[in-house]
Image (cartoon, helix red, strand yellow):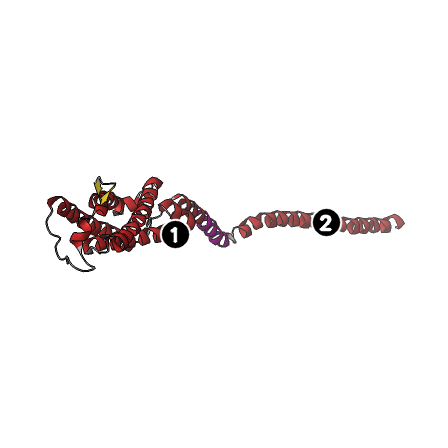
C-alpha cells in the first residue's frame, strides 16, 4: 500500500516535471518565432529604405541642374560674345563720316588738277576757296597737293571703318584706325593755322573735311576708351 501510494506521487512528480519541459518547448518555439520575427524585421527596412526614394529625385535634379549650370558657365566663359566691338551706331557713324570726307577729298582733288572754280564757295573776303586752293600752302613741300593727302587718308579710313573691320579680331586694324585719326586731326589743326594765319582765308570745302576728320577722331577715341581697341577687350571686361 505504501508503495502503491508512492507511485502516484512519482507520477505526479513526473507530471509536474514534464510540464516545464513542455513550457520550455513553448518558450523555445517562442524564441524561434521571435528570431523569425527579427529576421522579418531585418528584412523590412529594405522596404522602408525604398520609401524616401521620391525625396532623392529632387536631389538628383538639383545635382543635374548644378552640373548643367557649370557647363553653361564654362561654355560662356570660352565662347565669343555675340555682340562685338562698339555699338552699331558708332560703326555706322564712323563709316558715314569717312564716306563724306572721301567724297569731298575726291572733289577737291579733281578741282585742284582741272583748275575749275570751286562750287558753292565765295572768292572774296574771309571765305575764299580760290585763294586757299591756289596758295603755295596748298602744296606739301611743294610736291604733294593737300587734297591728294586727304584723298589718301580717306581711302584708308573708309575700309577700316566698315562693320567688317569693326568686328575684326586683329588688333592691328584697330591701332591703325585710331593712329590714323590722331595723325589726321593733327594735320587739320595745322591746316587751320595755315588758313587763318598765313593765307588769311577759309575754304568751305576744306572746312567740311576738317569737321569730318575731327568728328571721326572723337568717335574712334571714344570707342577705344569705352569699348577697347578690339572685341577681345570687350570680352575680357564682360568676364
User: In this image, 222 relative to 8: left or right?
Assistant: left
Q: Position of residue 142 (x, y in %)?
A: 22, 41
Q: In the image shown, does 216 or 149 lie closer to the viewer? A: 149
Which region is colored magenta?
54-67
Q: In this figure, what is the number of numbered marks? A: 2
Q: Residue at x 21, y 52 (%)?
A: 206
Q: Residue at x 20, y 55 (%)?
A: 203
- Secondary structure, magenta segment, majority class: helix
- Going from N to C along the chain, the mark reached first, 2 or 1, is 2
Q: Is residue 17 left or right of residue 74?
A: right
Q: Callout 1: few (<14), some (14-19), or many (20+) C-alpha neighbours within 10 Å?
A: few
Pointer 2 with pointer 1, Cβ within 8 A: no
Residue 60 colored magenta?
yes
Find residue 121 and report its image quarter.
Answer: bottom left
Q: Give the percent coordinates (x, y) of residue 27.
A: 71, 50
Mark carried by residue 1: none
Nearer to us: label 2 or label 1: 1
Q: Residue furthest right?
A: 2
For label 2, count other residues whose C-alpha is less than 10 Å away and answer few (under 14), some (14-19) or many (20+): few
Please give the label number shown on residue 22. 2
Q: Marks 2 and 1, Cα distance to the nearest angstrom?
A: 103 Å
Q: Does residue 196 show up?
A: yes
**What SS does tag 2 mark?**
helix
Identify residue for label 1. Answer: 225
Q: Position of residue 204 (x, y in %)?
A: 19, 56
Q: Decide which of 164, 193 is in the foreground and name it.
A: 193
Q: Residue furthest bottom?
A: 125
Q: Position of residue 107 (x, y in %)?
A: 15, 49
Amino acid at each position: 500500500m505504501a508503495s502503491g501510494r508512492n507511485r502516484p506521487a512519482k507520477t505526479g512528480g513526473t507530471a509536474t516535471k514534464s510540464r516545464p519541459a513542455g513550457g520550455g518547448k513553448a518558450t523555445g518555439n517562442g524564441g524561434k518565432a521571435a528570431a523569425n520575427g527579427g529576421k522579418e524585421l531585418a528584412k523590412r527596412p529594405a522596404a522602408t529604405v525604398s520609401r524616401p526614394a521620391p525625396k532623392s529625385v529632387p536631389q538628383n535634379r538639383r545635382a543635374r541642374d548644378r552640373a548643367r549650370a557649370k557647363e553653361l558657365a564654362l561654355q560662356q566663359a570660352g565662347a565669343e560674345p555675340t555682340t562685338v566691338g562698339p555699338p552699331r551706331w558708332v560703326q555706322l557713324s564712323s563709316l558715314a563720316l569717312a564716306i563724306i570726307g572721301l567724297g569731298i577729298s575726291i572733289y577737291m582733288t579733281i578741282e585742284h588738277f582741272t583748275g575749275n572754280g570751286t562750287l558753292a564757295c565765295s572768292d572774296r573776303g574771309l571765305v575764299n576757296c580760290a585763294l586757299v586752293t591756289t596758295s603755295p600752302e596748298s602744296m606739301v613741300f611743294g610736291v604733294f597737293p593737300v587734297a591728294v593727302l586727304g584723298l589718301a587718308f580717306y581711302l584708308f579710313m573708309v575700309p577700316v571703318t566698315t562693320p567688317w573691320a569693326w568686328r575684326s579680331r586683329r588688333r592691328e586694324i584697330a591701332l591703325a584706325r585710331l593712329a590714323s585719326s590722331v595723325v589726321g586731326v593733327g594735320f587739320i589743326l595745322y591746316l587751320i593755322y595755315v588758313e587763318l594765319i598765313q593765307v588769311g582765308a577759309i575754304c568751305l570745302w576744306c572746312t567740311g573735311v576738317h569737321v569730318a576728320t575731327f568728328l571721326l577722331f572723337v568717335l574712334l577715341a571714344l570707342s577705344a576708351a569705352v569699348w577697347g581697341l578690339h572685341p577681345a577687350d570687350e570680352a575680357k571686361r564682360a568676364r
